[in-house]
Image: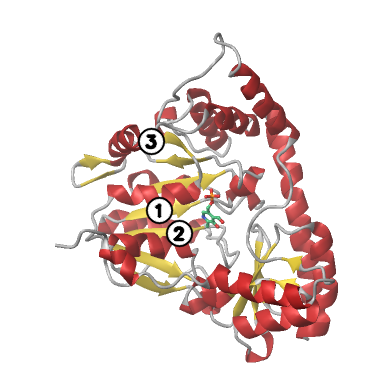
């Protein structure tokens, strides 16, 4: 019998960001005078908002006195924060009990940890191109993955498969990397499919705050029937600049049951066994995001990235380039012109325009021939990249 998890041996080399770093470092070593315009990795560039900073300072002070000090927190989340998240959903007409909201240290952690609820024989449906962690976390568990192509032909938002299959289904809307958003009608088809087949949808809502159109759902629970088939994983990383601060939340409805087991109760058991919760200081900071003033500041923060997207899309339009996303999403997914691959486009942009982006091939086979630009970049870099791109790619 093996002593270790041999599935790790079947993981594909995760060379995307390592390969990007290698090529960028080699270029920077040869051209130290050049400023690189970094539109690659989807990390944020704007700082935490004033309300969050004030709350974090306040939390540190609270920890300095025995009267206000917090020791171990609830493994499920700080009660006022769970309530604030439920209230945030209520503003969009989604009614959740506080007990259906779990505070996490970010979406990545949850996307990996949540798999503990599912049998390793359960198949996975992945809409590709996809955030690479979805596949890798399941390969580590030895699950079989069925890839469903998201393409130009279906607006990067595919329909459920014809075949009835019980599976764990990943849906990310707004999507990383394509920037596509799922309509209400389409999500309803996925919810119906999941309920009919006994599947569970893992809905990744990390970019929900970028949706400005009222008719596009920001939560899977805006769809009738979702509470019996979906888990929603969200994060303050991209909404409120928490990539380095770390806080998110996961919703597991109490109505979600499979095989006579209640998934909310299972997750309570999981959390109370496998974590001692998220730090009080961070949760106090996160709470400030949901205050009235905090929400105003979040909108100001997001407006920086939205303006980036508008500016960059204008540049792509002027250059006659074909792209998706950018509206209701912080990513722009460009079709590489002249039949080039994503990697060829990467080299061209780096060497001739000092623009760093991400080749679509890094998000799976269906990403070939596409290129992702992140709108979380510095606004000056976006403006300059917009100026340079037409001369290189026209
Ligand atoms: N889900 C998607 C689709 C992402 O793009 C990211 C980060 O880029 C995450 C989850 C992880 O977010 P977090 O910082 O909350 O771990």
Residue 274 visible to the viewer: yes
Callout 2: 10 Å neighbours few (<14), some, many (20+)? many
Q: Residue 366: x and y, percent?
A: 49, 78
Disc 1 from disc 2: Cα separation: 6 Å
In the image, residue 325 lies at what x, y percent?
Answer: 64, 66
Q: Answer left or right for 174 relative to 109.
A: right
Q: Earlier in the sequence, mark 1 or mark 2?
A: 2
Look at the numbered disc 1 and give the secondary structure of its residue. Answer: strand
In this view, the residue in front, 78 or 315, is 78
Q: Position of residue 301 (x, y in %)?
A: 74, 45
Q: Quadrant of the C terminus?
A: bottom right
Comparing 154 with 131, the one in front is 131
Q: Which mark is residue 275?
A: 3
Task: Give the mark toward the camera: 3 or 1.
Answer: 3
Q: How is the image coloured?
A: secondary structure
Circles 1 and 2 in contact, beta carbons < 8 Å = yes
Mark before the other along the chain sequence, 3 or 1:
1
* For residue 363, above or below residue 319: above
Residue 202: mark in rendering: 1
Measuring 47% from the left and 69% from the top, which residue is drawn there? Answer: 14
Identify the residue at image location x=28%, y=68%. Answer: 144
């Amino acid at each position: 019998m093996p002593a270790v998890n041999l599935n790790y041996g079947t993981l594909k080399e995760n060379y995307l960001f390592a390969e990007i770093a290698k090529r960028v470092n080699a270029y920077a070593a040869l051209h130290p005078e050049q400023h690189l315009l970094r539109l690659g990795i989807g990390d944020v560039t704007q700082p935490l908002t004033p309300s969050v900073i004030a709350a974090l300072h306040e939390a540190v002070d609270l920890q300095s006195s025995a009267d206000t000090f917090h020791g171990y927190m609830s493994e499920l989340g700080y009660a006022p924060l769970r309530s604030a998240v439920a209230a945030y959903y209520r503003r969009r007409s989604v009614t959740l009990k506080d007990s259906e909201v779990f505070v996490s240290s970010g979406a990545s952690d949850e996307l990996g940890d949540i798999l503990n609820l599912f049998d390793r024989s359960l198949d996975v449906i992945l809409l590709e191109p996809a955030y690479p962690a979805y596949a890798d976390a399941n390969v580590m568990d030895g699950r079989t993955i069925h890839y469903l192509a998201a393409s130009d032909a279906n607006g990067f938002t595919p329909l459920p498969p014809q075949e009835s299959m019980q599976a764990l289904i990943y849906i990310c809307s707004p999507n990383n990397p394509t920037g596509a958003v799922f309509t209400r009608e389409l999500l309803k088809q996925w919810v119906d499919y999941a309920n009919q087949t006994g599947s569970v949808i893992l809905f990744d809502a990390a970019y929900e705050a970028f949706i400005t159109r009222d008719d596009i759902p920001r939560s899977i629970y805006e769809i009738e029937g979702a509470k019996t088939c979906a888990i929603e994983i969200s994060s303050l990383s991209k909404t409120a600049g928490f990539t380095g601060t770390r806080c998110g939340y996961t919703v597991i409805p109490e109505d979600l049951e499979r095989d006579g087991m209640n998934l909310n109760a299972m997750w309570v058991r999981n959390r109370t066994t496998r974590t001692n919760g998220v730090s009080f200081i961070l949760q106090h900071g996160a709470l400030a995001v949901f205050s009235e003033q905090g929400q105003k500041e979040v909108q100001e923060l997001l407006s920086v990235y939205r303006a980036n997207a508008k500016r960059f899309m204008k540049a792509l339009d002027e250059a006659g380039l074909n792209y998706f996303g950018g509206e209701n999403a912080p990513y722009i997914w460009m079709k590489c012109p002249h039949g080039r691959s994503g990697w060829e486009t990467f080299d061209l942009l780096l060497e001739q325009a000092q623009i760093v982006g991400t080749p679509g091939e890094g998000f799976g086979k269906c990403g070939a021939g596409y290129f992702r630009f992140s709108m979380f970049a510095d606004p000056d870099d976006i403006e300059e990249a917009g100026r340079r791109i037409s001369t290189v790619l026209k």
